Image (cartoon, grey):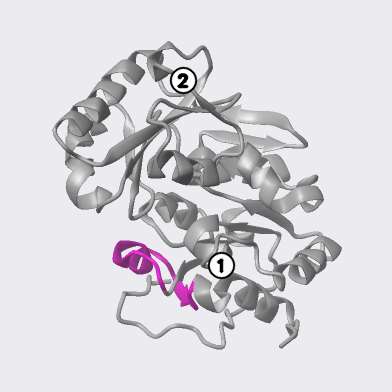
Amino acid sequence: MTATTATEPVLDPPALPDVADLRLVVSDMDGSLLDERGRVPGTFWPVLDELERRGIAFAPASGRQYANLRELFGARGDDLVFIAENGSYVAQHDVTLSTDPLPAGAVPDVVARVRELAAAGADVGLVLCGQRAAYIERVGDAFAEHAGRHYARLEEVADVTAVDDVVLKVAVFDFGSVEEATAPAFADLADRLRVVVSGQHWIDVMSPDADKGHALRRVQERLGVTPEQTMAFGDYLNDAGLLDAARWSCAMDNAHPDVRARARYVVPANSRNGVTRTLAAALGMTLPA
């Protein structure tokens, strides 16, 4: 099947063809499943009930911290497989299933580059994402407040390079356009690390093996599910691998143009409840008005 392009129409109503042997649904969070206020839509819970009733697994896949994702789903997340930290950490029942940590020797280099950008006047900050917690050294301002909304376990430290934890990634935040202003400072690392733009303001530096798509394939293998039995939703460049590993690859209408072009289908934006509405249509459900 050929991929859609950014100019093709959005599926609305979002009915996907031939959804018969669906066994796994994987969705990005920010910009995809979550609404514009960063919440799981209330209409999603009955859809999750129906997925569970039919034996279809659901896995959140996000650049967010595992603890933050567990907080979003509460008790409903007890049995879910979580793909966190852009694929560098996968867990279920609070048990680690896989990790792809950032090589320890890379951490000082990445941190030094962020500090140099800040010294040159860039409005940037970094989160050192560890397996136990996340760590920041820029505190007491809008960046720290923003980081606090994305990391449920967040610690303030004097020097992130002195942290004793397994480092999953370094997330760099730019109050401007990270793709235009900050990403070039890390471009030369791409031959030995994975550098991915994960949102308008975020760029993640990770192990070369860390990727949502790689993590999804591990989940598929664990569950005995094939790509032909998988549906995936995403909106940004860090979701490309996720979509590549799914037969029903769905880009949100609000997605980055490169992601729209990579997906087989384009569905309504997160602001229009696109993930939930698409799943409801696939399951033959009628959502409450």
Q: Residue at x 42, y 75 (%)?
A: 253
Relative to 268, does residue 61 appear above or below in the rendering?
above
| Residue 275 in view in this figure | yes
Expressed as whole percent of the image width and height from the top left, the position of residue 82 reads 65, 44
Residue 105 location (% of width, % of height)? 34, 13
Q: Is residue 6 left or right of residue 207?
A: left
Residue 65 or residue 230, whichever sits in front: 65
Query: Disc 1 vs disc 2: which is toward the camera?
Result: 2
Count residues near mark 2 (Cα–Cα under 10 Å), then give few for <14, some for 14-19, many for 20+: some
* Percent of width and height locating residue 92: 73, 38
Give the residue type that dot 1 points to. Answer: Asp
Residue hosting label 2: 157
Tell me which segment is drawn in magenta. Answer: 254-269
User: Does 13 lie within the magenta span?
Assistant: no
Answer above or below: position of 96 versus 177: above
Helix, strand or loop at mark 1: loop
Residue 7's x, y, as percent?
30, 81
Residue in the image at 67% along x and 51% along y: 72
Q: Secondary structure at mark 2?
A: loop
The picture quadrant where one finds residue 185 is top left
Q: Quadrant of residue 18?
A: bottom right
Q: Which mark is residue 35?
A: 1
What residue is rendered at 72% in x and 52% in y? 73
Q: Residue at x 70, y 73 (%)?
A: 20
Q: What is the spatial separation of the Cα atoms under label 1 and label 2, in whole angstroms?
A: 32 Å
Q: In the visual, does 71 lie left or right of 161?
A: right
